[in-house]
């Protein structure tokens, strides 16, 4: 048998349950909710109740949506490289540096051997 942890505080217990059951919205879901609000068919409060989110959460998503749109329209966006891409580029850079170093050494050897023959 496993021993159950005693409940120290009912408020903490409820917070723990809420934390473990918190819904995670995808970017697409957030965009759809913000777009639904932009259509202005329902009030923000009603929309938040429908999707079971806090109004502050909605307004945060709305602000992020607007800011991302501004950046895109002004051409102020840079593509973020993934860590895998960065690792691959670093490895390729390392190999190229080794190749250049090897070629420089070979060049020096050939140059010195030609100087000896002269």
Image (cartoon, rainbow, N blue to C red):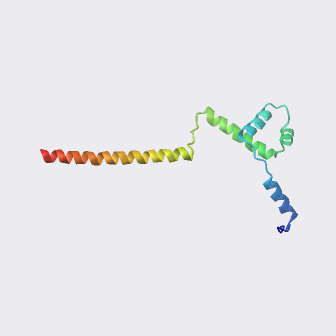
* The C terminus sits in image quarter: top left
Q: Is residue 106 left or right of residue 25?
A: left
Vertical arrangement, residue 113 with respect to residue 5, above or below:
above
Q: Is residue 91 left or right of residue 42?
A: left
Q: How many marks?
A: 0
Residue 51 image point, x, y percent: 83, 41
96 or 41, which is in the foreground? 96
Residue at 55% x, 46% y: name it: 84
Residue 20 image point, x, y percent: 79, 55
Residue at 87% x, 39% y: name it: 46
113 or 68, which is in the foreground? 113
Q: Is residue 102 left or right of residue 112?
A: right
Residue 18 image point, x, y percent: 82, 54
Name the quadrant containing residue 32: top right
Residue at 34% x, 45% y: name it: 100
Vertical arrangement, residue 11 with respect to residue 44, above or below:
below
Q: Residue furthest left?
A: 118
* The N terminus sits in image quarter: bottom right
Vertical arrangement, residue 16 with respect to residue 40, above or below:
below
1 or 31, which is in the foreground? 1
């Amino acid at each position: 048998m496993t021993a159950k942890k005693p409940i120290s505080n009912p408020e903490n217990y409820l917070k723990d349950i809420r934390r473990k059951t918190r819904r995670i919205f995808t970017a697409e879901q957030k965009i759809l909710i913000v777009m639904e609000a932009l259509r202005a068919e329902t009030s923000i409060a009603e929309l938040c109740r429908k999707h079971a989110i806090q109004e502050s959460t909605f307004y945060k998503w709305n602000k992020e949506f607007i800011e991302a749109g501004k950046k895109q329209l002004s051409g102020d966006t840079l593509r973020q490289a993934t860590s895998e891409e960065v690792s691959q580029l670093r490895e390729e850079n390392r190999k190229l540096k080794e190749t250049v170093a090897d070629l420089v050494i070979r060049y020096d050897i050939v140059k010195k051997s030609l100087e000896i023959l002269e």
